[in-house]
Image (tube, rainbow, N blue to C red):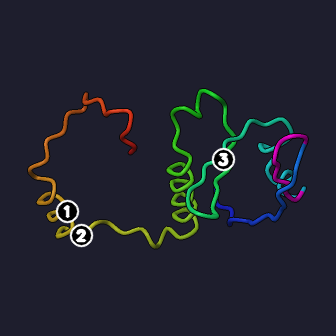
């Protein structure tokens, strides 16, 4: 995953009774996973910002596309610039231990449906 991010332009239009987004053909040539009849999910991540992901219905319920995109970004950045990766300092480790010392964790705890992590 060492590729630089590439931006593709498009327009919002109408297709039958639905709204549609038309994008440059070069996007589909470079990324065939977005080809015709692919199932996609659009996630609004901020005003004016949307993440479009190829999805299969089983994965759509469990994966977080924003986390996936962030982790992919981190992986690409580490691959391009491994010299930027540094070990945590001992003082940072000690601070984290102090901050989390009194927190009890139950790995089997079930979160309510209205909690998003």
Name the residue at 86% across, 54% down. 13
Circle 3: element type: strand
Report x, y in % for residue 97: 14, 57
Rounded to the nearest angstrom, the CA distance separating label 3 from label 1 is 38 Å
**Disc 2 packing (10 Å; few <14; some 14–19; many ≥20):** few
Over which residues does the magenta segment extend? 16-24
Helix, strand or loop at disc 1? helix
Q: Where residue 41 sits in the image (x, y, percent)? A: 67, 42
The front one of 54 and 117 is 117
* Of the two numbered discs 2 and 3 in the rendering, the one whose residue sits closer to the viewer: 3
Q: Which residue is mark 2?
A: 89
Judged left or right of residue 92, residue 48 is right
Q: Main secondary structure of the magenta part?
A: strand
What's the distance in space between the residues labelled 2 and 3, CA to CA?
Answer: 39 Å
Q: Earlier in the sequence, mark 2 or mark 3?
A: 3
User: Taking 58 as reference, is 4 left or right?
Assistant: right
Quadrant into which the C terminus falls: top left
Give the number of marks. Answer: 3
Q: Which mark is residue 42?
A: 3
Give the secondary structure at mark 2. loop
Residue 59 in the figure: left or right of residue 53 = left
Residue 106, magenta (yes or no): no
Q: CA distance from mark 1 to mark 2?
A: 6 Å
Q: Are marks 3 and 1 in contact (CB under 8 Å)?
A: no
Image location (x, y in percent) of residue 32: 82, 45
* Residue that badge 1 annotates: 93
Foreground disc of the pair 3, 1: 3
Residue 85: horizontal and vertical position, in percent? 42, 68
CB atoms at circles 1 and 2 under 8 Å apart? yes
Using the rendered view, name the quadrant where residue 4 is placed: bottom right
Q: Residue at x 81, y 53 (%)?
A: 21
Please identify the residue farthest to the front as the structure is shown. 17
């Amino acid at each position: 995953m060492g590729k630089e991010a590439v931006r593709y332009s498009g327009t919002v239009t109408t297709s039958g009774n639905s709204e549609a987004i038309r994008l440059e053909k070069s996007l589909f040539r470079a990324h065939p996973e977005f080809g015709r009849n692919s199932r996609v999910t659009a996630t609004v991540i901020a005003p004016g910002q949307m993440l479009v992901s190829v999805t299969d219905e089983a994965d759509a319920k469990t994966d977080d596309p924003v986390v996936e995109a962030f982790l992919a970004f981190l992986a690409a950045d580490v691959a391009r610039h491994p010299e930027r990766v540094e070990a945590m300092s001992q003082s940072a480790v000690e601070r984290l231990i102090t901050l989390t010392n009194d927190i009890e964790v139950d790995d089997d705890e079930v979160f309510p449906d209205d909690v998003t992590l």
